[in-house]
Amino acid sequence: MKGKLHLARNVIMVGACFAMASLLGMVRNIVIASQFGIGADLDVYYAAFKVPELLFTVVAGGALVTAFLPVLAEYIAGDDNDGAWRLASAVTNIVVLVAGALSVLAALLAPWLIRWVVAPGFAPEMQAETAVLMRIILVSTVLFAVSSIHNSVLNGFQHFLWPALAPVMYPIGIIAGALWFTPMWGVRGLAAGAVLGSAMHLAIKIPGLVRYGFQWKPVLDIRTQSMRRVGVLMAPRVLDLGIFHLTFLVTANLASRLTEGSVSALEWGWNFVQLPETMIGTAFGLVAFPTLSALASRRDIPGLRSTLAESLHHVLALTLPISAAMILLGRPILALLFQRGAFDAASTEAVLAPLRFYALGLVGHSCLELAARAFFAQQDAITPLYIAAATAFFQITLALLLVGPLGAGGLALANSVAISVEVAVLLAVLRKRWNGVGGRSMLAVLGRVLPATLAMGLALGWVVAYANSADLSPLLTLILGGSISVVVYAVAGLLLGIPLLRETLQRGRSSLGALVARRPAA
């Protein structure tokens, strides 16, 4: 019980920080939208991130985190803080050297990479500007690489606050770039803001590192057993995430051949769906991973099964209704938030189709955060690699089939379908390995969540139809639709017995009862 409360508190805290980061990300997008709209400038800006993001993933993204944290956790569990910091130092030093070298190489090859790999459909002047922006953004690759290691270290000490606040810093840097740098440098100011945000992402964790006795040592320790284990665990995960980002590179490549603004529309639709995915899926995944790693080290299969199943129950209960709401309320949301300045009604319509199709994959992406980490906690990165490679091939094939009839929306739909299939296969493998993953309980939860979501969707569909006929403003539509959605889903969910809603209600009653009990008598 104590462990569940600890997990719940950390999820709430991390989720709140991610919500703050998402809110600032929304402000960032509002500022960018008013200045640039959906068009060539933003196509160039977003395309410039594809190679730096791929390099970060390969060198120090989730691959390093999932390989490094289980090994680090063993030092911490054994109260060997000196060993933990030596391992952290060695990993940091190697990552800086590798990330720096690859960033320099990518900067030298930038024109060729943009012309032939990232955006062959761009006009020559757009390709040249994309290469310039890519060189600026590559600086942030090294900063993020170091920052990701520090995230893992603090999470290994079961400290989540400062790592969770780090994503809050990044959009602040881009907002500063949009407000202060773009008047002088145009879209290059956004790239400079990204570098500033990555530096702030790194700096915010310094107090937490100092608290846990930060030590840096000028070592590489390539031949030690710990570093070899990190390397063995990391190699397949690098390929796994590399394949994932390769699909986005292929998506950008295909989108660059469509109408102007298609790259931007896809990026905005993806970013919008990433808000709830980060607040829910990533929050649960980050907080559950140390627990899953500890359970795996003790070979506690029932504990692994229970922790994964319970986390998935909550993710399903949260993401299914949000997915439905984003599909039905996508147009008024986009209009209210972004439709001003250079972002006109045509920009809203351009983003709407990718948003809706990406929203279909919200459940899959959120569950993937947990399903994949269940393998990494057991220090198995090979199985997810094979599954990711197969689903990536499936996604690219599907994208080639759908891009013709559906345009940018088809590329988003291919992603959503492929991710959902990947999660289903991962859970099927875990079910066989663990002799069950709580499948019956998950089906029971789905049997409650789906009808509640359907009831909410029907009510929301009526609201949207009424708003269109009455010509309500986007703000009134969202207030009316959001209020009715929350009430209908909550009531239907409580009547159907959705565990998350019942637990929330019980905790609310307990907190209220405790508050009343503490009040002094009159």
Image (cartoon, rainbow, N blue to C red):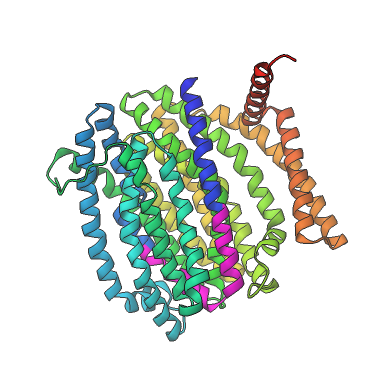
Relative height, residue 126 to residue 520 (above, below): below
In the image, 476: left or right of 32? right
Q: Main secondary structure of the magenta part?
A: helix
Q: Residue at x 51, y 47 (%)?
A: 18
Residue lying farthest left?
223
The part of the chain drawn in magenta is 23-52
In the image: residue 268, left or right of residue 492:
left
* Residue 247 horizontal/vertical position (percent): 43, 61
Residue at screen point 44% across, 85% down: 125
Q: Is residue 520 magenta?
A: no
Magenta stretch encompasses residue 31? yes
Identify the image quadrant of residue 449.
Answer: top right
What is the quadrant of the C terminus in the image? top right
Above or below, 468 against 148 in this view is below
Q: Residue 23 appears at what percent x and percent y?
A: 58, 53
Give the quarter of the image for residue 305: top left
